[in-house]
Amino acid sequence: MLGLAKRVGALFLITSTSEVYGDPLQHPQVETYWGNVNPIGVRSCYDEGKRTAETLAMDQRGLNVEALRKQPLIVYGDGKQTRSFQYVSDLVEGLMRLMEGNHVGPFNLGNPGEFTMLELAKVI
């Protein structure tokens, strides 16, 4: 896809997650923070490709449907892990503005408000 985009002069947008920072020592992470993982290191294509393939294989086991069955949700770990959420429409608007601008390189786009996984499970 990258080669095709280059040949036809198209923009190419890659979206990702804060998980690429590994176990960050800085919150929130800024675009220049590498975290504990260097996504553009010499071996990163192999390492990240393997990690992605393994994750996809694990995720194929089945969809978590406890909430739909009104069963208690499974929360892995102590539930204190945090994530931020945002409206998809806000993300799409931000991505469109980013694509229409002149910025090149990493750009973190998200909601600074974080919730623990226990808080999320209670809402669901």
Image: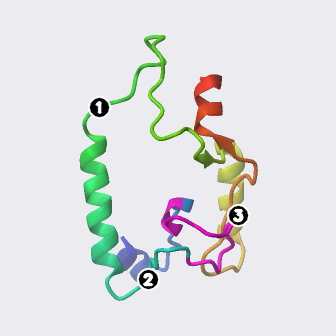
| Residue 23 point in image, percent of width and height | 52, 64
Q: Quadrant of the N terminus?
A: bottom left
Helix or strand or loop: what does disc 2 sit on? loop
Q: Which mark is residue 40?
A: 2
Helix or strand or loop: what does disc 1 sit on? loop
Marks 2 and 1, the one that precedes in the sequence: 2
Mark 3, mark 2: which one is toward the viewer? 3
| Residue 111 point in image, percent of width and height | 73, 52
Residue 52 in which image quadrant:
bottom left
Instruction: Please determine whether, in this image, residue 51 is positioned above or below residue 112.
Output: below
Task: State the residue in front, 84 or 92.
Answer: 84
Instruction: Please determine whether, in this image, residue 34 is positioned above or below residue 112.
Output: below
Residue 3 in which image quadrant:
bottom left
Q: Quadrant of the C terminus?
A: top right
- Residue 112 seen in the figure: yes
In the image, what residue type sits under mark 3? Pro
- Residue 13 seen in the figure: no
Range covered by the magenta-colored residues: 19-34
Q: Residue at x 72, y 48 (%)?
A: 90
In the image, what residue type sits under mark 1? Gly
In the image, what residue type sits under mark 2? Ile
Marks 3 and 1, the one that precedes in the sequence: 3
Q: Which residue is mark 1?
A: 62
Q: Is residue 117 magenta?
A: no
Mark 3, mark 1: which one is toward the viewer? 3
Q: Residue at x 26, y 66 (%)?
A: 50
Q: Which mark is residue 28?
A: 3
